[in-house]
Image: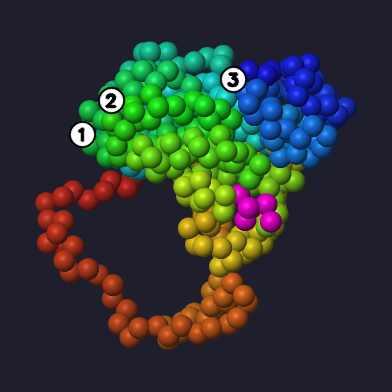
Amino acid sequence: MVTSADELARYVELTPEERAGFAASEQLFRVGLTPYYAGLMDKQHASCPIRMQAIPRAVEADIRDEELRDPLGEDSRNPAPSIVHKYPDRVLFLVVDRCGIYCRHCNRRRLVGGDEPPTTSDLEAGLDYIARTPRVRDVLLSGGDPLLLSTRRLGYLLGRLRAIPHVETIRLGTRLPVVCPMRVDDELCAMLRLHHPLFINTHFNHAKELTPEARGACERLADAGVPVGNQTVLLRGVNSSVRSLRALMRGLLRARVRPYYLFQGDTVIGTDHLRTPVEAAQELYRGLRGWMNGMAVPMLVLDAPGGGGKVPIVPSYIESHDEQRVVVRTYRGARIEYPQPRERDCAVAYDDIYFAGEPADDDSEPCR
Ligand code: SF4
């Protein structure tokens, strides 16, 4: 792991601003990245998207009143150690506190860094909570980066989760295909195969990260039957242009990765300089929708501060509507009328037959 300015200076010529960033971040959020990722940096230009994601800037210390340590309100939704239960039918299982890179935009910077790893009893308590909570249909392993666990340890946890009858799907959130693609080896893929249905969401933010090695990692996962999705964070000056986003999304599809979310930046401390105005995010989205294969277009969302959950902030393409017609604006700007149907009742009569005897979903608030 590259952790200091002196070590990084072997890869790039650091600017005074970057050196000042190292000094300013000492008390705020650790620096760390893999040698592989450092090797992708542009040696001359500090505006390189790899450098901007990995190297702190002094402005990180300029914390604004509205910035939060826990922007997603996770710390108040912990029914068990290592569990965040925010949405009705799924939980976040924080199984490790280390990452392969400490991203300057990270919304979980308060938790990651390797100082207080979850203990075995924390993980057991998390597994126990999931096992005794039947409403949990889906578990997202995150942290930190779960692929930093040994293959054996990760396989053990996945096996325990798979043994819980009501857990239908398991997801892993990982940045290792981006920053350490060699971690995705045959042994890991063989283990993952045993635990389907299993999904991976990774986190590419720029086409420059889609190296042959990274694409190979994604393809190995796909070959192991793991659908791979991508969550991009919109970062000012890193990927906040239509050209950059189109190249990234198209490159992801070529690597068999489905763009999933495009996140508006969270209000986490020390990241104001990396956030885009919401109107700019919507304008960027307009540059994607319709201009590319729809599978390449991620959902633009904002994670509501305080734990409200993800809210789509896709711009509206509806100009007006009533019971007779809807007027839409196409991606090319044309106004077109869509006639409404005459019948307005959408109830499905067969639901009562097909779902007879099945309890309805429990949509109440899971944690207070
Ligand atoms: S890999 Fe994910 S959890 Fe780790 S620092 Fe980056 S964004 Fe945060």
The amino acid sitting under disc 2 is Gly
Identify the residue at the far right of this view: 16
Q: What is the CA distance from the residue labelled 1 to the residue labelled 3?
A: 33 Å
Q: Position of residue 145 (x, y in %)?
A: 50, 27
- Is residue 150 at least partly visible in the picture? yes
The answer to whether residue 276 is left or right of residue 89 is right
Residue 297 image label? none
Closer mark to the observer between disc 1 and disc 2: 2
Query: How is this picture coloured?
Result: rainbow
Residue 113 image label? 3
Q: Position of residue 198 (x, y in %)?
A: 34, 37
| Residues drawn in magenta | 243-248
Identify residue for label 2: 159
Contact? badges 1 and 2 (CB < 8 Å): no
Q: Name the N-terminal-most of marks 2 and 3.
A: 3
Contact? badges 2 and 3 (CB < 8 Å): no
Residue occupying image coordinates x 34% and y 28%:
190
